[in-house]
Amino acid sequence: MEVKKSGRSVMEAQEIMRALSRVAHEIIEKNRGVKDLALVGIRTGGVHLAKRLAVRLKEIEGQDLPVGELDITLYRDDLNCRKGHPTLRKTEIPFDITDLTIILVDDVLFTGRTTRAAMDGLIDLGRPSEVQLAVLVDRGHRQLPIKATYVGKNLPTALNEQVEVFLEETGEPDRVVIISP
Amino acid sequence: MSLKRKDLLGMRDLSVEEVTLILETADSFKEVSGRDIKKVPTLRGKTVVNLFFEPSTRTRTSFELAAKRLSADVINFTTSTSSMVKGETLLDTANNIQAMRADFIVLRHPAAGAPHILARALQAAVINAGDGGHEHPTQALLDLFTLREKKREFRGLRVAIIGDISHSRVARSNIFALTKLGAEVRIAGPPTMIPRDIEHLGVSVFYNLDEALAGVDVIMMLRLQLERQGIALFPGIREYATCYGLTPERLRMASPDVLVMHPGPINRGVEISAEVADSVSSVILDQVTNGVAVRMAVLYLLSGGK
């Protein structure tokens, strides 16, 4: 994928770190600790964020949480409309999700269609007692009745703008950028 | 990414990149087959027709499972139970199936080139599940997938393909694929079963099994296809087993971590002894497991290649 380097930066490294710290505290508060919690990142951006949240949660609560990686390609609702398929990656959730509280993690919440696909994918793997959603950025424009449980930053955008999240794990300095057409 | 083609007809015209894409995609599908709920909604509403003009259990079942695990609907036509016995031509049969809006046609046919004719005539994606003595691409792909899982690297791998090379579409597809990927391919069998000038495909020919097996990393045994041999190509089954059967003693000629493969169904005691078929070197059942994942990958990738 070609990434345009232009655009307006709306979050820098430190802000992203603070947002994730706040989300980690909110997760602990809402769930009264981290017992029976597991993190599942949606490929690819969500996976790095899920791992960062797990590190932060361990610093606070001193406990390792299981982290899984979910690929939602097979559950997309637009496979028939697109020309060519997106690259299929592997789902790797090396633990039984049944009876756990699963926190789905994604970088950007937009139409809600990815979240829908992720929930369907997750439920094919077992029956979690609860599914919560953590996102770094909520940019609005939902097309499905879906709401995040934890939001790093609410970001008002126009529909035709693009929001890109860059993370150190992919070799770019941490930042969130809005690209206007 | 998708395959930029409508049909999968053979290994000969696939690029190394396309083969790699199929194998990597199959890796993801193998995970799906390992789940409790072995089904994803990806091909919901698509129809796959298995059109088999030759007997098959493994390949047809494997395609059927692959399609069902992707949520497609599957219809099976076999020669004995369909109008094909009433004298309808292949193309008429296929046109009728297409008129019912099938999206994929999986064809096995005794005539080489039959899937190519359908591919040109139909909008549906055509997958070759074996055409005469020509090609059987999904078998080669599942063999490659199994090899990659166990050996990681194709380059420099020494592979011996043993048996009736002349009648074997599995051998031909594997020769195309393995030479393309940089493996060293040896073939061995009775002179009556080795096609003339096969060296042009980049393989070395042996008539002595022990010499062919020396130091190899992989042995692919072929089934003795008694039903295809109109004229006697060898004096008798016992002589064939003595000269070309894979026994534990012969297995020792190969590299210590050799893999033994067979496309099935196996004739125990003929081309392969029961001890070898059931030994730790044998990956025959892994091949079957991987066949479903590879066929899921092919269906998925072709569905995006319009």
Image (spheres, coloured by chain):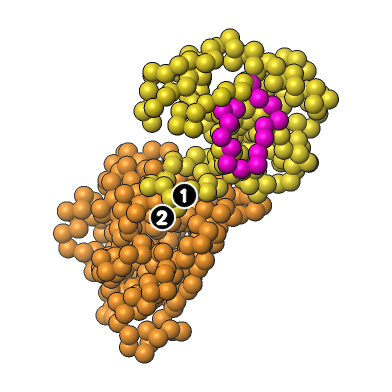
Instruction: Using the numbered discs, state the Cα–Cα distance from disc 2 to disc 1 in whole angstroms.
Output: 9 Å
Q: Neighbour class for label 1 at 10 Å: few (<14), some, many (≥20)?
A: some
Q: What residue do we see at 65% from left, 39% from top?
A: A146
Q: What residue do we see at 48% from left, 24% from top?
A: A164
**At which x and y percent is residue A83?**
38, 47
Q: Which residue is mark 2?
A: B303
User: Mark 2 and 1 residues: CB-CB less than 8 Å, in contact?
Assistant: yes
Secondary structure of the residue carrying numbered label 1: loop
Q: Is residue A130 above or below residue A155?
A: below
Which chain's colour is orange? Answer: B
Classify the position of the N terminus of chain A by image quarter.
Answer: top left
Classify the position of the C terminus of chain A by image quarter.
Answer: top left
Q: Main secondary structure of the magenta part?
A: loop
**At which x and y percent is residue A99?**
78, 41
Q: What residue do we see at 43% from left, 59% from top?
A: B262
Secondary structure of the residue carrying numbered label 2: helix
Which chain's colour is yellow? Answer: A
Q: Neighbour class for label 2 at 10 Å: few (<14), some, many (≥20)?
A: many
Same chain for mark 2 and mark 1? The answer is no
Q: What residue do we see at 26% from left, 80% from top?
A: B231
Q: Which mark is residue A79?
A: 1
| Residue range of the region highlighted in magenta in the rendering | A137-152
Q: Is residue B183 above or below residue B238?
A: above
Q: A147 or B2, which is in the foreground?
A: A147
For the question of whether residue B153 can be seen, the reply is yes
Q: What residue type is disc 1 on?
A: Leu
B32 lies left or right of B229: right
**At which x and y percent is residue B162?**
34, 59
Total marks in image: 2
Q: Magenta span has A142?
A: yes
